[in-house]
Image (tube, rainbow, N blue to C red):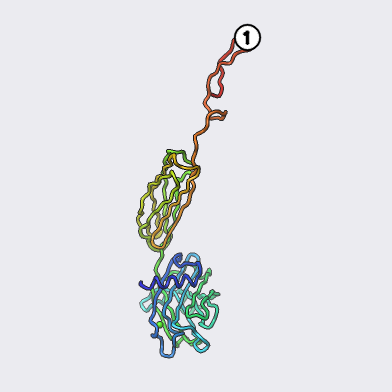
Amino acid sequence: MRPRLLLIPALVAGLGAAAPAHAAYFAEATDPAGDASPAAGPARDVVAAAIAYDPRTGRLQGMVRLAGTADDDTNAFVGLFAGRTSPTGCDRYPAIGLTTYTGDVDGDWVFLPAPGAQAERGYARRTGYGTPQLVFDASARELTGRDVDCFVVSVTEPGDGAVTYDTVGPVRLVGQPELGMAARGVPTVMPAGASRNVTLRFANPGHAATGRLRLSVRAGRGLTVRYPRVVPSVRPGARRTAKVVLTLTGRARASTPLTITATAGKLRSTLTKTIYLRRPAKGGGGGPSTPWCLRWQPDLSGDTGGSLVRAPC
Ligand SMILES: [Ca+2]
């Protein structure tokens, strides 16, 4: 979808650090300016919309951009709803949504369990008051686990939903991949000259394939790392492993940093470890691993002349 690059920064900017790349589902759409009903005017004419949803956390975020900023004469009711696709559109229940009046500073989240059933609703944070762009962010238990696959936007007359100024959609929601990376077998301490096999484990608990993973490694002096540059895509709900071999040479310092990064499209996962050099033990001392020597012990009493005894070498 071509406007993606345009819209994602807009939504991210509106939502602060909450990038929709972490949402389980995401969708966006543009809409022509000037297609609203003749009485609508720019402030009731949608030009772009986006939605991000995570059924695990019940977080629902949305963005609606209008062609103009609303004033007292152009107040409108804006609804952004996600439901399931039916032959007649995106109108199969249960549905979840975000609503506001363009002239208000706050919004509502809405849960519609079934046709004709009482809607449940609560507070949705809204930003962008006084601008043409309305951005919503809501989290609620009622929003968790909803099996939605599309969204629609409508702008209507306040108090009269039959007067519609503009609509967008249905737009299909797109599942997003996720990427987790862990390592098994990374040693804390290694002697110089040793090699260790490490298993990288990738997991995708998301809703789309990750696409091909690219690995990159940064290692401190004296640590060589053999690893695959590319790992095949991880399907949603699947896991995959990759083998890495670490070798520490005599050039290594006392501690050696190791950073492994996997990237796939917008996804990025990083592991950071420190490997300490095990130095060879010094001679002497009486520790349990010290080898024993037999030594002649003279008998100063003169009775035996002496005997062999065991002593640290
Ligand atoms: Ca429009």
Tag 1: Cα neighbours inside 10 Å, few (<14), some, or many (≥20)?
few
- Lateral position of residue 215 relative to residue 274, left or right: left
Residue at horizontal 51 percent and vertical 82 percent from the top: 102
Q: Position of residue 283 (x, y in %)?
A: 53, 29
User: Given the current orientation, which residue lies at the most extreme right position?
Assistant: 301
Q: Nearer the viewer, residue 155 or 85?
A: 155
**Numbered marks: total:** 1
The reply to whether residue 128 is visible in this rendering is yes
Q: Amino acid at mark 1?
A: Gly
Q: Is residue 53 above or below residue 313?
A: below
Q: Is residue 14 above or below residue 42?
A: above
Judged from the image, the quadrant occupied by ligand 1 is bottom left
Residue at horizontal 55 percent and vertical 18 percent from the top: 295
User: Given the current orientation, which residue lies at the most extreme bottom position?
Assistant: 39
The reply to whether residue 120 is visible in this rendering is no
- Residue at disc 1, secondary structure: loop
Q: Position of residue 189 (x, y in %)?
A: 49, 41
Residue at horizontal 42 percent and vertical 69 percent from the top: 26
Q: Nearer the viewer, residue 88 or 134?
A: 134
Q: Which residue is tagged 1?
A: 302
Q: Position of residue 179 (x, y in %)?
A: 43, 58
Which quadrant is home to the C terminus?
top right
User: Given the current orientation, which residue lies at the most extreme top position?
Assistant: 303
Q: Is residue 280 above or below residue 15?
A: above
